[in-house]
Amino acid sequence: MHPNVGIEMAYKKKMEALVDNMHRSIMWWVVNAYKRDTPETVLMALDESSAMKLHKIIQKLTKYWHKSFNEAAKEMAKYFANKNQNQTDSALKAILKSSGMAVEFKLTPAMRDTLQATIKQNVALITHMADNHLKEIEGITMRSVQAGGDLKYLSDQLEARYQMTRKRAKFIASDQNSKATASITRVRQVELGIKKAKWLHSHAGKTPRPTHMALNGTLYDVKQGAWDKDADGKGKGRYVFPGELIKCRCVSRSIIPGITKGY
């Protein structure tokens, strides 16, 4: 079961659209206020009233975009979780059908809990991304005022921060897509009575986890997971599932005795 790239790209686009709108709003209000109220002579004098005007503008922007992201995050996270469930169920159903097994999946309590956890986690990630961006924008603007920076300096700093937040949105879409697919797959494996699965390393990423490379091809209990002796990256081990850890793109292959070749 592999994460669906289409869902990841659609989710990324939705987040990027929100980030783009926020950036345009910030650039318009902050840059215009900076240009109008803080000429070079005032900047060098550390004019308090100009700084306070900028501070108030950023506070209003923060309040507005915090609310906007909170509202949008709930809908986006729900869309993402449901899309993942439908896609994963359809893919798993097709795999089982090819092996002569007809299965109808239902929204069980376990699946409902998994979807709610996925939604909650994604809402938190999206809103934190926006809050962190807005906090950094205020810091950049105030530091620019204090340092007597010109408009180009401020614009370049705001643009750099914007690109960082866009990169964060891309990471959230990719990482959460792997996690959601893995969680939904695990629930369905347990519900189908599947006991074992094979760990398949993704062979992706510039710095793959040595422990996950070593787990490639290993059978593990679908209720317990596989032992990763360096799960935290600091030598502390625990049982984990494919796709669970940050940036992990590993997947699982269900083992069904009598159907899976070799078992």
Image (spheres, grey):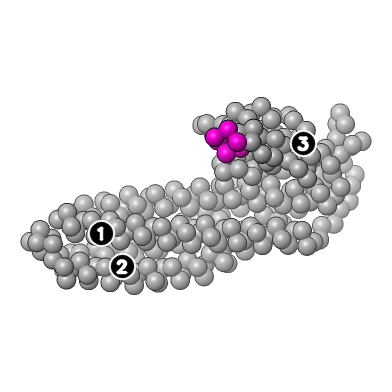
Q: What residue type is labelled 3?
A: Tyr
First in sequence, mark 3 or 2: give its number: 2
Q: Is residue 232 part of the magenta span, yes or no?
A: yes
Q: Where is residue 26 in the image (x, y as percent from the top left)?
A: 32, 64
Report, in whole angstroms, how far the alpha carbon at label 3 lies from the one at label 2: 51 Å
> Please, is residue 113 above or below residue 201 in the view?
below
The reply to whether the C-beta atoms of the residues labelled 1 and 3 are less than 8 Å apart is no
Q: Taking 29 as reference, is 83 above or below it?
A: above
Which residue was labeled with disc 2?
A: 58
Residue labelled with disc 3: 220
Marks 3,2: beta carbons within 8 A: no
Q: Is mark 3 on a helix, strand or loop?
A: strand
Where residue 31 is drawn, which disc sits there?
none
Residue 141 bears which disc, if any?
1
Q: What's the CA distance linking mark 2 and mark 1?
A: 9 Å
What residue is shown at x 66% (from left), y 39% (from top)? 238
Q: Where is residue 224 in the image (x, y as percent from the top left)?
A: 76, 43
Q: What stretch is highlighted in magenta?
A: 231-236
